[in-house]
């Protein structure tokens, strides 16, 4: 399972979580801006179940910016860690 796909999955999860935060207008979308501090710890192969968790570390609804971090696990072991993801909010 390519590492870039793991980061993409974490970014999508962070976007879904961020859209549920207070101050976000219905119909808004989050645009992925960048990623920093990515570490791959364990190979992920077909058939593995990737368990993901993300945390919104900063959110500014007024300016439409969010930052998040995330981790992905396979069999309880850390497989991928993202130090920081940046998003921009686009109002409808």
Image: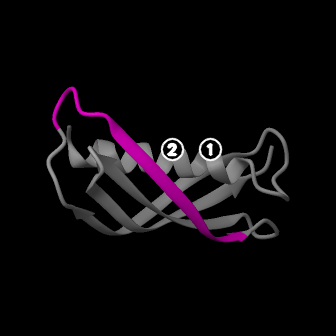
Q: Is residue 90 left or right of residue 46?
A: right
Q: Which quarter of the rendered picture does the C terminus lie within? A: top right
**Viewer-proximal residue, 31 or 16?**
16
> Relative to 81, is 25 above or below?
above
User: Which type of secondary structure does the marked residue at label 1 adopt?
Assistant: helix
In percent of width and height, residue 55 lies at 56, 62
Residue at image mark 1 = 16
Q: Residues within 10 Å of mark 2 (few under 14, many from 20)?
A: some
Q: Is residue 9 left or right of residue 90?
A: left
In percent of width and height, residue 22 lies at 83, 58
Q: How is the image coloured?
A: one colour
Work out how far the residue at label 1 is from the one at label 2, CA to CA, in angstroms. 6 Å
Picture residue at 51% right of the left edge, 57% below the top: 54
Mark 1–mark 2 CB contact (< 8 Å): yes
Q: Is residue 88 left or right of residue 3?
A: right
Is residue 53 part of the magenta span, yes or no?
Answer: yes
User: Which type of secondary structure does the marked residue at label 2 adopt?
Assistant: helix
In percent of width and height, residue 83 lies at 39, 71
Is residue 67 part of the magenta span, yes or no?
Answer: no
Residue at image mark 2 = 12
Q: Which quarter of the rendered picture does the N terminus lie within? A: top left
Picture residue at 57% right of the left edge, 60% below the top: 87
The range drawn in magenta is: 45-59
């Amino acid at each position: 399972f390519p590492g870039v796909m793991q980061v993409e999955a974490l970014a999508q999860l962070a976007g879904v979580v961020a859209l549920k935060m207070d101050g976000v207008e219905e119909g808004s979308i989050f645009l992925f801006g960048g990623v920093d501090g990515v570490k791959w710890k364990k190979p992920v192969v077909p058939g593995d179940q990737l368990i993901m968790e993300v945390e919104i570390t900063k959110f500014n609804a007024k300016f439409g910016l969010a930052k998040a971090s995330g981790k992905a696990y396979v069999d309880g072991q850390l497989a991928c860690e993202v130090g920081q993801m940046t998003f921009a909010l686009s109002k409808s």
